[in-house]
Amino acid sequence: MPAIVYYHPDFISGNYRGEKFCDFSLLTNDLTSNCEAGLLTLFVLDVEDGKLLRGKNKPSWTDTNGDEISILIGYKAGGHWHYHIGPYDPNSTSTQAKIRDLNISGATSAAVIHYRWYDPTTKKKLIILSFGPKHRKFPKTRELPNHLTSRGGLISFGKLIKAITDK
């Protein structure tokens, strides 16, 4: 089942780039397999088409075994997840799953998409919070800057920015 993708307004209007978090305007846009804008676009299209995804997809408050990490409890409260967007490690084996599903056996990559569901029960509206150029495991909730905690609270649906696709 497809989902509709939205961007958090601070992801679009922000101007931050670091290893853990990057805003839309500062994504790389070149002709390589590491093109961040291209990886993001493919992710949005695949989610909106309801395709199976190759990357690892998991809650941001758990480790690879699914065990909760107590210092990241704030991510659980916000419903934060992350998806490994590629390019993928050629040595990793992977399974495929839909964006709504846990996929701890998915392919890993340096880059990730940080997201949450606007409607966690039905999972029809996905909100992209930030792009992570280099996945640094478990950024602490009080570490600054932290686009997950600053963008993880309540938000009016009218403030979300629809990803521009033909869907």
Image: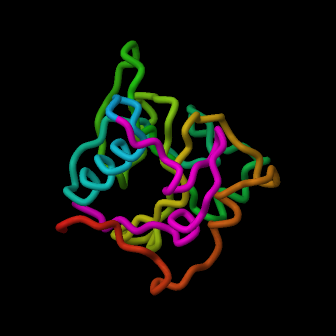
Specify start and end residues of the magenta stretch as a single range.
1-30
Residue 111 colored magenta? no
User: Whole-percent x and y of residue 112?
Assistant: 50, 41
Q: Is residue 160 above or below residue 67?
A: below
**Quadrant location of the C terminus?**
bottom left
Q: Is residue 96 above or below residue 160?
A: above
Residue nearest the viewer, comparing 49 with 96 = 49
Residue name at image x 70 percent, y 65 percent: 150
User: Whole-percent x and y of residue 59?
Assistant: 55, 49
Q: Name the residue at the front extreme.
A: 30
Residue nearest the viewer, comparing 90 with 120 = 90
Residue 35, picture quadrant:
top left
Residue 14 colored magenta? yes
Residue name at image x 58 percent, y 68 percent: 10
Residue 134, picture quadrant:
top right
User: Whole-percent x and y of residue 140?
Assistant: 77, 46
